[in-house]
Image: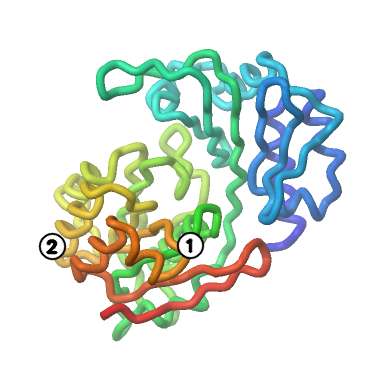
Amino acid sequence: MTEEYAAARYEDACALLPGRLRAAAMTVERSRRAETEEIRLRIGRPVALTLPAMELSLPQTRVIRGDLEQVLDRATEYSRYVAAETLRHGYVTAEGGFRIGVCGTALPCGERNEGIRDVSSLAIRIPRVREDAARPVLPELLEEGRPLSALVLSPPGGGKTTLLRDLVRLLSQGTELAPPCRVALVDERGELAAVHRGRPQLEVGCRTDVLDGCPKALAVPMLLRAMSPQVIALDEVAMPEDVAAVCTAANCGVTLLATVHAASLQDLRGRQVGRALLECGVFRRAVVIEGLGAARQCRAERLP
């Protein structure tokens, strides 16, 4: 991924901002633009840029409520009704693959949240496709040309989603090491493929079927019945019901690719969901991502 491409993605995200905030954000030097992972807007505070090692404030800015409303209007193309379901879960996906996290006052109804009013802050995540990010570890995830079930580990913001997305792309299109596979992608939070009006905004391969916005525990059985996948990929296994869905898929002979929050295998074993994932015996490899920003490195480890 070039600095020019990374900076261009930042500039595309800035197009969602009101004019005065956009003008301020565009004064940032190119190297900072390329590093920025999120643009955060909080009422009464300066615009903040999330970089790998710090959060940088733009002191000449001050966010007002109308700024947040303008961003949401642009992101939903002035039709919030269309985005009501994802807004209920606290985010909306804009054209270009930008996922915008939303905070404010929740409107709970029983165990369900009906929406968010009095929006107080937004986080515009800037996704960047890093082609061949997964290629260095791909040989370790294959056995006789067939993909092995694997977990991708890193702390939050460590690059798990980026690596999983590229791994899905490589397996879907095929490489010199492995023939193409039918991949089913569970994109519960809209970050892997960033589907907007039915079309993935980020490249996930020509043989990948995306199920967007569906909880993993429901999505996995649906895909097994309907799409006959060879590989199922899912982001951020965090709940016991997600682990149960993973085990169900493995019993059907499907290769599983999943991400989980953990800094290392030792850290993973110290977490309840992590232990359950390892104890179910589904995964043959773990890909551990270490470092920040351009210094990130990944390595594959065998699992017993």
To which residue does mark 1 refer? 154
Element at label 1: strand
Counting residues from the start of the chain, the first of labels 1 and 2 encountered is 1
| Horizontal side, residue 44 vs residue 190: left or right | right
User: Which corner quadrant holds the C terminus?
Assistant: bottom left
**Please, is residue 91 above or below residue 154 in the view?**
above
Does residue 169 appear in the picture of this structure? no
Residue type at tag 2? Cys
For residue 275, the mark is none
| Horizontal side, residue 192 vs residue 4: left or right | left
Element at label 2: loop
User: Which corner quadrant holds the N terminus?
Assistant: bottom right
| Horizontal side, residue 257 vs residue 81: left or right | left
Does residue 43 appear in the picture of this structure? yes
For residue 252, the mark is 2
Q: What residue is at 39 percent from the left and 71 percent from the top?
A: 265
Residue 253, percent across and down?
16, 67
Q: Residues within 10 Å of mark 2 (few under 14, many from 20)?
A: few
